[in-house]
Amino acid sequence: MTERKSPGSLSSSAMPGVVERHRGEERFKFLGLAAILVSLSFLAFFLVSIIGTGYGAFLQTALKVEVDLTYDSLGLVEPATEEDIANIRYRSIVRSAMRDIITEDVGRREARTLYGMLGAAAEFDLRDIVVEQPQLIGTVASLWLTSSDDVDLYNKGDASEASQLQTRLSEKQQEWYATLEAQGRIKTRFNWTFLTSSDSRDPEVAGVYGAMIGSFFALGVCLLLSCVVGVLAAVYLEEFAARNRWTQFLEININNLAAVPSITFGLLGLAIFLGFFGLPRSASLVGGMVLALMTLPTVIISSRVALQAVAPSIREAAFGIGASRVQAVFHHVVPLAMPGILTGVILGMARALGETAPLLMIGMIAFIADPPSTLTQPASALPVQVYLWADSPERGFAEKTAGAILVLLVFLLLMNLMAVILRRKFEK
Amino acid sequence: MLENKLIQPLNVSYSSDEAGSERADEAAKIVASGVNVSYAGRPAITNVNLNIRSKAVTALIGPSGCGKTTFLRCINRMNDLIETCQVSGSITLDNEDVYGDDVDVVVLRRRIGMVFQKPNPFPKSIFENVAYGPRIHGQANKGDDLNEIVERSLIRAGLWDEVKDRLDAPATGLSGGQQQRLCIARAIAVEPDVILMDEPCSALDPIATARIEELIDDLKTKYTIVIVTHSMQQAARVSQRTAFFHLGELVEENEAKVIFTNPSDDRTRAYVTGSIG
Ligand SMILES: Nc1ncnc2c1ncn2[C@@H]1O[C@H](COP(=O)(O)OP(=O)(O)OP(=O)(O)O)[C@@H](O)[C@H]1O
Ligand SMILES: [Mg+2]
């Protein structure tokens, strides 16, 4: 290779301004990359903190106790009927089981704090176990029962000084805890209760099941309404309506509605569905209707975009062999627009799933301890549950809040995944 | 032979043999009189008077933007779909006004089929493409009848041998020329009287073009064909009558041979010899 003295006529320096142009390109690339990194780091921070707080909601602490279920101590005669089982006084059985482990002499006050280590959840646990396995009656069974919320937090918290000081366990309870731990009577297990029970005043028995069912009902109603009404409206506006002032006016209004704060739709729902039509408060039916109002503009807009994207040549082909408008639209245009329409609908649903404000307006904020079994029963919803728990003073609800957010995130992820899969399927 | 035709544009054999001036007095299939079309108030074609002969090929030629497509789309009222488009004057099909009050465009378009510039098969199977028209018009509902119509149409369009083993394959997988023949099969499956073709070969190579020209030649025994083309050679080869449009006017319409060899208007002469356009 010969050493070149002057740069060739094709190098950047041969043309004025080119070097500066390349530099501009570099700058833009760098800024773009920085923007992506910043947003990714926010996302990572959010996920880490939510998962860090929320994973605890899926774990619970259990204590192993020997419960005396002999006929003598239950005061029953063989064989025990179902009624007998229902009438067993589980609280006192759990309490005496605790007394059997901690044998030291304690006064009445102290005894109560001892019983407090196994809370209401333990009684429910025991009842469920006995109902499921009646053969345990007549024996002394060694069972794992859910600990109280305070013990649970004490167990899950790290052993650092700070968290020891913050704990609500008394000195005496901490001593007992150490004893139990030394005997191998404490373990951490998966918290099914969180996924199978509904809201409760006690953090250790509170779960998201009721809210999940409420959300499911509301979303079902919302999906039905916004799919049918939204897609039909979009098809009409795009394929049938004449382009005139009136449709332009409609179009502007729909675009505006898509940007209206969601709480406004709640107020609208309150006035119309509850005030005018007299539908029940807090019902998932009304919740779904309000969410449908909110998602309709989005569904209409995205469906129209999908319809517009269908090549005009397909319409011409259909019209050219004498298809009527309805035939051209429903045989050819809508099927081709389906992936786009579905994506819009599912993204609208995902937004509806995470929406709280409009639901608050129609009373879905009430404390509801049972999952709804019909559309008109009072119900809660996942984001509302998050809001309620975030507001609770008990420390046990902090991790429940994050746990509920995680459940919500998983649902959102599943819905978006479904959107992708459906789109793939229809594009084939 | 084919190359020859392409290289020496006007040295072609005119297909005026059986449908020339001898049949000039024969009743016209389509009569356009005083047709004006404007898009959003801007005139596109003005005062077009044209008789289109039955069972013959009429070619529309002229420079880009002169209104050939616009005129063609007036005949089967495809212009109705463009909201800014205003049509006045009259067009009759078998002496019946196409723009009459009681005309149903569905019926009209079944009788006047159309083949577009770019092949536009439905993104469905080959069979479905051809069967769609007969099905919506209720020509055949039973499987066997429908199969027969599809087979007959594909044979007429000269595509049967190439696709008979894969009727269920997606039509979009065919080559451009095959797709265009499929579109022709789709058009003739509903048994129209007239077929309008808007530059049907503009996206095709010479061999595919030659096949479609053969097909057009064959189809004219049964159908009235109006074809828009930018290729003077093609117009000369396939048409019996040729109409020359210029700046929205119909300048001249005559036997193809006359238009290409001895046109009466200077603009036509300039266009066919290649000095304007
Ligand atoms: N949809 C439309 N909206 C507005 N103007 C149009 C529309 N279609 C055609 N025009 C105008 O009408 C005139 C005639 O167009 P047309 O498409 O009929 O020409 P053409 O002869 O088919 O041209 P080409 O040979 O390029 O296809 C042109 O000036 C064109 O700009
Ligand atoms: Mg054209």
Image: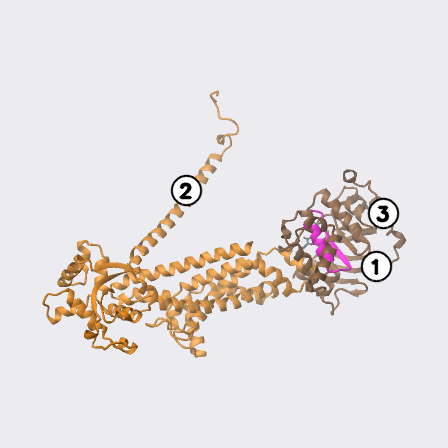
Chain colours: A orange, B brown
Q: Amino acid at mark 3?
A: Val
**Residue A417 in the image, given as x and y percentages of width and height:** 45, 56
Vertical order, B5 against B151 (above or below): above
Mark 2 residue crowding within 10 angstroms, few (<14) / some (14–19) / many (20+): few
Vertical order, A385 against B207 (above or below): below
| SS of the residue under disc 3 | helix
| SS of the residue under disc 1 | strand
The chain holding disc 3 is B
* Residue indicated by mark 1: B28
Nearest the eye: A332 or A193: A193
Mark 1 residue crowding within 10 angstroms, few (<14) / some (14–19) / many (20+): some
Residues rendered magenta in the picture: B179-202
* Labels 2 and 3 within one chain: no
The chain holding disc 2 is A
- Is residue B123 found left or right of A7 in the rendered image? right
* Residue indicated by mark 2: A30
| SS of the residue under disc 2 | helix
Q: Is residue B184 magenta?
A: yes
Return the residue found at the far right.
Answer: B22
Task: Of the two numbered discs 1 and 3 on the same chain, state the one appearing first in sequence.
Answer: 1
Q: Is mark 3 within 8 Å of ligand 1?
A: no
Which mark is in front, 2 or 1? 1
Q: Is residue A187 magenta?
A: no
Camera sees residue B243: no
* Residue indicated by mark 3: B258
Vertical order, A220 against A414 (above or below): below
**Residue A136 in the image, given as x and y percentages of width and height:** 26, 69
* Labels 2 and 1 within one chain: no
Q: Amino acid at mark 2?
A: Phe
User: Residue A314 appears in which quarter of the rendering?
Assistant: bottom right
Q: CA distance from mark 2 to mark 1?
A: 71 Å
Q: Amino acid at mark 1?
A: Ala
